[in-house]
Image (cartoon, grey):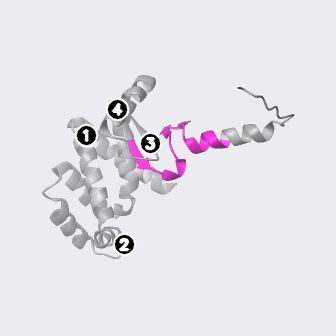
Amino acid sequence: MLTNQLAVKYAQAIYELAAEKDILEVVEQELRLVESTIDSYDDLSTLIYHPQVLVQAKKETIHKVFGQDITEVVLKFLLLLVDKRRESILPEIIYEYVNMANRAQGIVEAEVTTALPLVESQQTALADKLSLVTGKKVVLKTQIDQGIIGGIIVKIGDKLIDGSVVRQLATLKKALLNNEVTGIEVTDSI
């Protein structure tokens, strides 16, 4: 609970600064870059998140790895997190920041699951259709799950649209099991 409250507090701080400078999208992209880079390298992740690594070593590493690729706002924010020993909640802060920035910009994220990858034209058409339904700009987060066999599953906030083949088969199975077969009639259709 405390971690979430801290994440919201820090996310709110960088959100307000980014909004004041009118760089909400830039800050979001940079925070996502930082997160994906840290997640991609185990040694970097260990160094940044380990509580026994010296603050100065973490700050030097952040300067070397990210100094040229991020704005001064994000760089100073990361250094502040290290000074306050809050770098371990960076993923939660980024999550909260993205939610705040999306709300402010009228953007909603849709988690889309398909059995096969969607081509760009399908993604665009789906995003446009969901934008019409929600009245907001929709950004797709796609993932592949061959277990759904076919179709699509869309989750926006607490709403779920399950058009997967596996769900349709389960519904059909349930309907067949609930209906008693009273007789079978064979007809000659010649």
**N-terminal label among 4 and 3:** 4
Q: Earlier in the sequence, mark 3 or mark 2?
A: 2
Secondary structure, mark 1, is helix
Residues shaded magenta = 141-170
How much space separates mark 4 and mark 3, taking CA atoms? 20 Å
- Real-space CA distance between mark 3 and mark 1, rounded to the nearest whole angstrom: 20 Å
Q: Can you identify the residue that label 4 sits on?
A: 104
- Residue drawn at the location 44% of the way across and 26% of the way down: 134
* Earlier residue among tags 3 and 1: 1
Q: Is residue 89 magenta?
A: no
- Mark 3 lies on a secondary structure that is strand
Q: Which residue is mark 2?
A: 51
Q: Secondary structure at mark 4?
A: helix
| Horizontal arrangement in the rendering, residue 80 relative to residue 86 (left or right) | left
Camera-near label (2 vs 1) is: 1
Does the segment drawn in magenta span residue 162?
A: yes
Q: Nearer the viewer, residue 32 or 148?
A: 148
Badge 2 amino acid: Pro
Q: On the image, numbered disc 3 is attached to which residue?
A: 111
The amino acid type, in three-letter code, at marker 1 is Glu
Side (left or right) of 187 relative to 12: right
Q: Quadrant of the C terminus?
A: top right
Residue on which disc 1 sits: 25
- Closer to the chain start, of discs 2 and 1, is 1
Q: Are marks 4 and 3 in contact (CB under 8 Å)?
A: no
- Is disc 2 surrounded by few (<14), some (14 to 19) or many (20+) residues within 10 Å? few
- Measured Cα–Cα span from mark 2 to mark 1: 30 Å
Gap in angstroms between the C-alphas marked 1 and 4? 11 Å
